[in-house]
């Protein structure tokens, strides 16, 4: 089949598929139902400067400031300058952002951490990603050139004569499938499942990054994993995201003594950049005795004159399942892995170093977020860089001299048959990896812990299963992503943004560069 394969049904994949379908056929594959992605769970909103040149300039400055000296400024400029047009499109396509005066007035804007102005649009209070996904998916479903394949797990990229032309995959019953055409856009999102504590859904297993790395793609900035400061902390419950917009509306953070502590850590207090808030919460939660953990709380009890349940209907409903009332109770919180700033290294058009392979959104690293992403910039990233990648793909495809034939056979499975494990053992292996990553490559890191987990990961390599099922393929991918994070974190001997090394607590000016990893080696480069 001629045309392009897009992997991922979040905001980036959907928006890119629509841009590609103007000219080409698109095969859009998603691991679960098309709406299950990080996009679907994005609560707070989408940051955008709709107020003209000065507004755009400030959004750029905030993005650069939050990224702690590592934002690739050209990427940030593109994000903030092209963002407003992408939002106008969403509005034209029927996305219902919240408006003043009962939906009749201007777009409502809220403030979040490290933003100098209220510029975050939201939908249905705290269900922004779901609303944007709904509007895009509706359009995708009416586009005859887009062929949607749900419940398909991608295993391996298909390479022919040095060019990526498609993907080997598994259907819902783990039957082999191959999609091939002109090339592939990875829009497969992040890898939060590599950590035991994450706000990400189960699909976020870093498949795109691992597949790309295996065919020789360079990855960058893998040491920068953003930990969202406020996930619900109830034993045995998932780390449900408690949006930064809560703090934007005035929520405070309190330690176990009931003290508001953020003012001790940053002049912006609860609205400091995310990495600073997350580490402060972690420090306040470390007790005097080894292994002791003290509770930290989000507090909105002082907020009067606002109907918090109406403003945050999804969060309120979820909290009530655990017996909490947003306006009356202290809510126990803790940080959880949320967003990967690093990923498959691309230029500003989604091009990787491998012909035929493009990447955009969270799976990619353009340098737009530097060492720490500004709150609510990720949905905008998906729109802006999804379209830019699609435009470059169409140019690339039009230059392709001959049609590319589809391959018939699925690739040989990785791992050995003897390494095939039963589902329980794979699940135990996955949990072990996630726990070790949290412990040794989480919010605070050092040489000893990172070396320990590197040895563990080396040993684990021999326990990896053959990738003949979704769970097994995910296990292999999580392992690859963990290795990339750990190797990059070991190489960066400084603290910057989300990467905090207790043995190197300061910036190292010599490492104010992006890490790049290929074929097991890490170096540091400037993005140009
Ligand atoms: C949130 O609502 O806090 C998450 C949005 C984001 O990750 O930027």
Image (cartoon, helix red, strand yellow):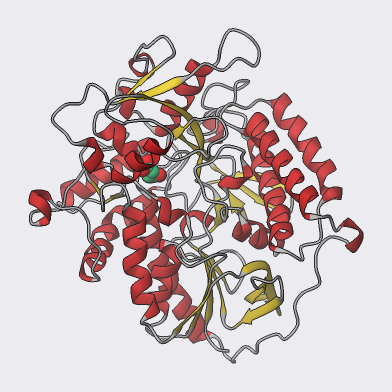
> Which quadrant of the figure contains the N terminus?
bottom right
Image height check: is 331 above or below 381? Answer: above
Where ligand 1 lies, by quadrant?
Answer: top left
Q: Nearer the viewer, residue 273 or 391?
A: 273
Report whether 192 appears left or right of 278. Answer: right
Q: Residue at x 68, y 39 (%)?
A: 486
Q: Residue at x 20, y 40 (%)?
A: 118
Q: Residue 456: x and y, percent? A: 79, 37
Inspect this view and state whether residue 114 appears: no
Image height check: is 77 above or below 451? Answer: below
Q: Residue 235: x and y, percent? A: 55, 30
Image height check: is 507 above or below 8? Answer: above
Report whether 199 appears left or right of 306. Answer: right
Q: Residue 223: x and y, percent? A: 59, 40
Q: Nearer the viewer, residue 205 or 382?
A: 205
- Name the residue furthest right: 418
- Name the residue furthest bottom: 402
Q: Nearer the viewer, residue 176 or 327?
A: 327
Q: Residue at x 26, y 23 (%)?
A: 301
Q: Residue 185: x and y, percent? A: 53, 70
Q: Nearer the viewer, residue 432 or 88?
A: 432
């Amino acid at each position: 089949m001629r045309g392009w394969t897009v992997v991922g049904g979040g905001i980036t994949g959907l928006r890119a598929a629509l841009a590609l379908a103007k000219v080409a056929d698109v095969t859009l594959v998603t691991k679960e139902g098309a709406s299950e992605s990080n996009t679907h769970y994005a609560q707070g909103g989408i940051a955008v400067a709709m107020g003209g040149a000065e507004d755009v300039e400030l959004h750029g400055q905030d993005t650069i400031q939050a990224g702690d000296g590592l934002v690739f400024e050209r990427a940030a400029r593109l994000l903030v300058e092209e963002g407003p047009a992408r939002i106008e499109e969403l509005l034209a396509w029927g996305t219902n952002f919240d408006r003043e005066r009962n939906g009749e007035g201007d777009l409502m804007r809220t403030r979040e951490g490290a933003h100098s102005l209220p510029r975050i649009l939201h939908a249905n209070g705290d269900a922004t990603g779901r609303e944007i996904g709904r509007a895009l998916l509706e359009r995708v479903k009416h586009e005859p050139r887009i062929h949607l394949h749900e419940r398909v797990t991608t295993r391996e990229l298909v390479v022919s004569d040095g060019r990526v032309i498609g993907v080997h995959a598994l259907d819902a019953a783990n039957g082999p499938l191959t999609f091939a055409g002109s090339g592939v856009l990875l829009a497969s999102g992040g890898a939060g499942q590599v950590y035991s504590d994450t706000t990400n859904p189960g699909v976020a297993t870093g498949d795109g990054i691992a597949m790309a790395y295996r065919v020789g793609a360079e990855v960058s900035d893998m040491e920068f994993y953003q930990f969202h400061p406020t996930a619900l902390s109830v034993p045995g419950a998932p780390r449900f995201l408690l949006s930064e917009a809560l703090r934007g509306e005035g929520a405070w953070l309190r330690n176990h003594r009931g003290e508001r502590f953020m003012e001790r850590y940053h002049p912006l207090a609860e609205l400091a950049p995310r990495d600073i808030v997350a580490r402060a919460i972690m420090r306040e939660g470390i007790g005097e005795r080894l292994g002791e953990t003290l509770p930290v709380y989000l507090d909105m009890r002082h907020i009067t004159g606002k109907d918090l349940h109406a403003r945050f209907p999804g969060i309120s409903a979820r909290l009530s399942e655990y017996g909490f009332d947003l306006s009356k109770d202290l809510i126990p919180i803790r940080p959880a892995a949320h967003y990967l700033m690093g990923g498959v290294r691309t230029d500003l058009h989604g091009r990787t170093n491998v012909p035929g392979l493009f990447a955009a959104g969270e799976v990619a690293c353009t340098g737009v977020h530097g060492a720490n992403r500004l709150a609510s910039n990720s949905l905008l990233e998906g729109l802006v860089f999804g379209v830019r990648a699609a435009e470059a793909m169409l140019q690339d495809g039009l230059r392709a001299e001959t049609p590319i034939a589809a391959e018939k056979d699925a690739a040989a499975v990785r791992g050995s048959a003897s390494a095939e494990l039963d589902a329980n053992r794979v699940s135990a292996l996955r949990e072990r990896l996630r726990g070790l990553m949290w412990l040794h490559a989480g919010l605070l890191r050092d040489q000893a812990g990172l070396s320990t987990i590197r040895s563990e990961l080396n040993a684990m390599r021999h326990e990896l299963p053959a990738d003949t099922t979704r769970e097994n393929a995910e296990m292999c991918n999580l392992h690859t992503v963990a290795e990339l994070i750990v190797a990059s974190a070991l190489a960066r001997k400084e603290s910057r943004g989300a990467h905090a090394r207790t043995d190197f607590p300061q910036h190292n000016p010599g490492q104010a560069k992006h890490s790049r990893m290929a074929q097991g080696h890490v170096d540091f480069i400037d993005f140009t």
